Amino acid sequence: VNQISNLLVTMARNVVLTLHPESDAVVKTVCGGWEAQRSPDGATKVNLGTLQFGQSKDVVLRMSSLPASGPFLRATVDYCPLRGGARKVEATAEAGDAKGAMAVEPHRCRALAVEALCKTVEIAGSDGDETRLAETRELLSGAIEQIKASPAA
């Protein structure tokens, strides 16, 4: 029954987000635990897996060298719907959109929390000595302070 219900709500599979920086912009980091692959041409690919109807998957980026105005990032999403062939959707991000930056802030905070928790689990799984435990406390405290300082908090 679970497999049938999963098929009924699945919108697309093999969803891949490709980020193409423009105007000398650089994608420094893909935040929130997503695995990213960089290509020699500067593009960054993020495998988003399967997408269900009504589901969103948020990808937060740290970027540098953004222009004061104009487009700085072109994003393409390649996916395979359950019926039909492969499809592609494209969008562009433009600099100077303060409203858009505030909309991203809660997702940035969530990405900070995810990264801190993933790193904590990684450290705890290593050897668990007292020094490493202090490191995890410091890591989590730092993430909490950054989130508290956010305008979205």
Image (spheres, grey):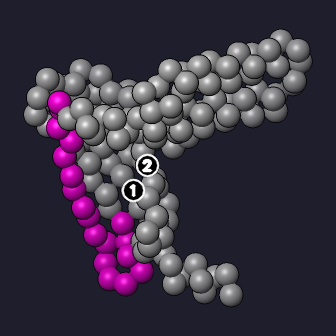
Q: Quadrant of the N terminus?
A: bottom right
Extreme-top residue of the structure: 131
Label 2 sits on a secondary structure element that is loop
Q: Above or below — where is 77 with respect to 147?
A: below
Residue 42, placed above or below residue 34: above
At x 31%, y 72%, the residue is 86
6 vs 87, nearest the viewer? 6
Question: What x and y, as percent, mark residue 22?
Answer: 18, 34
Q: Is residue 79 above or below residue 1?
A: above
The three-letter code of the residue at mark 2 reads Asp
Q: Which is nearer the eye, 38 or 120? A: 120
In space, the residues marked 1 and 2 are separated at their CA atoms by 13 Å
Residue 143 located within the stretch drawn in magenta: no
The reply to whether discs 1 and 2 touch (Cβ–Cβ < 8 Å) is no
Which of label 1 and label 2 is nearer to you? 2
- Quick one: label 1, few (<14), some, or many (20+) residues within 10 Å? some
Give the residues drawn in magenta, as a range.
79-96
The label on residue 58 is 2
Q: Which residue does the numbered mark 1 point to in the structure image? A: 16
Mark carried by residue 56: none
Which residue appears at 22% of the width and 25% of the height?
66
Q: Is residue 82 visible?
A: yes
Residue type, label 1: Val
Q: Residue at position x 74%, y 16% from top?
A: 135
Q: Is residue 123 left or right of residue 117?
A: right
76 left or right of 105 in image: left
